Image: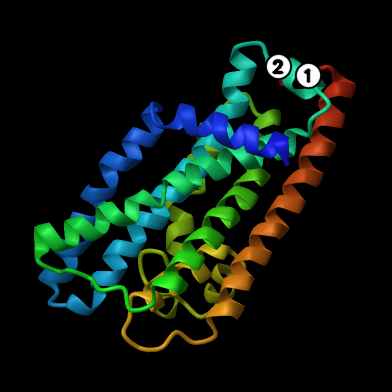
Amino acid sequence: MSLFLAALRFQLRLATHSPGTLQVWATAPLFTAVFLSIAEHADRTDLTSFAVVAPTLMGQWALALGIAGELIAEERSQGTLEAVIATPGRLSVIVVGRILAVSLLGVTTMAEAWLVAGLGFGRWIAVPHPVVLAAALLANAAAMAGTASIMASLFVLMPSARIVQNTLTYPLYLLCGVLVPLSTLPAWVRPLGRVVFLSWSADLFRAALDEAAVSRPAGRIAVVALLGLSGYLIGALLLARVLRRVRRLGTLTHT
């Protein structure tokens, strides 16, 4: 636990000055304005919550995926990756702790989106279910860290993480119903989206912003948490196997 907390605190200190974090904070209001403009033009004010939820999840996932690749790339470029792996602490714990830090910071994009909707479009969104929203935000941040840790093992093998990062952003947003409801996608695609925690998080966030009672909130939050835990376990197993391989081949620094 001490290693996990140390990694989390370390990344929090770094992230507030990181170009990646600043970029997400700068682009979240722009995405919100674009989505709200589309909804207004189509006379679909009922989609206002979509325009707030989408930039939140997009920002969090971009930060999580970015740090999953950058922490490996930075350690490798600085020649310290071998030292980090040689320490008694588990690399998977360090990875998850650092990713969780930026995922928690990404929660602030929802506040940005909410302010843009209110100040820019006069759409002040109420939060009828604040407890559900808070629990969903925390569960989603944990699931972000667990799922993004799977990518860390790939980034150890690859000289550059940029290609994988680009592939797993916008296509995933569409697949998981972050930008549009899953019900609007082809029937054969919808089960694929449900395998990823983002679809459950998006539904929960929008439900928490709706006046109607939230159906089965505890169970849905548990699904998000379980999917995140599954991601962490898969990531830890993959990372252990990859580290054994690169140690045996002597290709830790250069793949």
What residue occupies the far front of the structure in this picture? 2
Depth check, front residue: 252 or 171: 252
Amino acid carrying label 2: it is His
Q: Are marks 1 and 2 in contact (CB under 8 Å)?
A: yes
- Separation (CA) of disc 1 from disc 2: 5 Å
Q: How is the image coloured?
A: rainbow
Q: Give x and y (percent) for residue 245.
A: 85, 29
Identify the image quadrant of residue 152.
Answer: top right
Residue under numbered circle 2: 254
Q: Is residue 141 visible?
A: yes
Viewer-proximal residue among 114 and 248: 114
Q: Which residue is mark 1?
A: 251
The image quadrant where one finds the C terminus is top right
Q: Nearer the viewer, residue 77 or 1?
A: 1
Asked which secondary structure carries label 2, the reply is loop
Judge the density around disc 1: few (<14), some (14-19), many (≥20) Cα neighbours within 10 Å. Answer: few
Residue 153, visible in the rendered structure: no
At 31% from the left and 69% from the top, the residue drawn is 50
Q: Residue at x 65, y 44 (%)?
A: 149
Residue 24's image quarter? top left
- Tell me: 160 left or right of 24: right
> Quick one: quadrant of the N terminus?
top right
Residue at horizontal 39 percent and vertical 35 percent from the top: 21
User: How dense is the environment of label 2, judged by Cα within 10 Å: few (below 14), some, or many (20 and up)?
Assistant: few
Q: Residue furthest top?
A: 79
Residue 101 higher or lower than 119, as above or below: above
Q: What label sits on residue 146 in the rendered view?
A: none
Task: Decide if residue 75 is on the left or right side of residue 50.
Answer: right
Left or right, 119 with reference to 245: left
